Amino acid sequence: MIFTFRRGTARRTAALFAAVLSLIATVPAMAAITVHFHSFNGSVLWGRYPHTFVVFEGTLEGNGQRVQENFGFSAKYTSQAITNRPSEHEIVTEEERTIPKTNRHFSVRISDAQYRALRAEIERWRNYPGRYYDLDERNCIHFVAALAQMLDIRADVPVDYLRRPKAWLNYVTRNNPHLGAEEID
């Protein structure tokens, strides 16, 4: 088959093709945020206790902003936390190099609106006045449970799991088969 173009048609077609390509290049590719739920087993050698936290990664659909951040909740001072009374609190972040050494239990894709709501909840925990960390009532597990519940994930915190982040996230996995995740040994 032979195509013939009228004068200027090839140039117009090429210009249109270039315009479409430039438009596609400005749209964020596969924009979406994923929140990953992690646990850390603890380390006697490094003085770190078992812990749970969330990792956000991806791209916001609305503005194409890249997101790579993580958040956990902890007592500011271990000595206060072990007294079983409310303690000074802080939002903590894991170093990027340590995250691959933790347990990723499950991941959920979220919308920009859900991301903003989760970030607002994290800031509420960060800015709560007074001593907010409580080993039995508001520890890292309760923090991650609050975030999970905002995503309609069944994430209650039975007393048997209060100080066992990995076991607790395995419990959450068992109770939410729709997540398609497997328990971690």
Image (tube, rainbow, N blue to C red):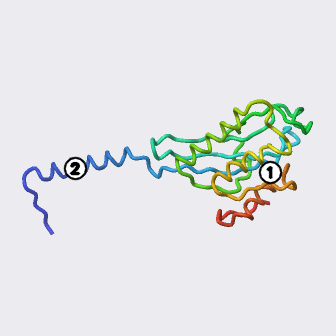
Quadrant location, the N terminus = bottom left
Q: Extreme front residue here?
A: 129
Left or right? Give the position of 6 relative to 67: left
Depth check, mark 2 against mark 1: the one in front is 1
Q: Secondary structure at mark 1?
A: helix
- Would you call the spot at circle 1 few (<14 residues within 10 Å), some (14-19), or many (20 or more)? many
| Residue closer to the observer: 65 or 46 | 65
Tag 2 and tag 1, C-beta contact below 8 Å: no
| Residue closer to the observer: 157 or 169 | 157
To which residue does mark 2 refer?
16
Residue 88 placement (x, y as % from top left): 81, 31
Q: Residue type at mark 2? A: Leu
Q: Extreme bottom residue here?
A: 1
93, above or below 36, in the image: above
Residue 28 placement (x, y as % from top left): 43, 47
Location of residue 129 by image quarter: top right
User: What is the CA distance from the residue labelled 2 to the residue labelled 1?
Assistant: 56 Å
To which residue does mark 1 refer?
165
Q: Residue at x 20, y 50 (%)?
A: 14
Q: Residue type at mark 1? A: Pro
**Residue 102, labelled with which disc?**
none
Q: Residue at x 79, y 36 (%)?
A: 132
Q: Residue at x 62, y 40 (%)?
A: 120
Left or right? Give the position of 67 relative to 101: left
| Residue closer to the observer: 80 or 184 | 80
| Residue closer to the observer: 43 or 173 | 173
137, above or below 75, in the image: below
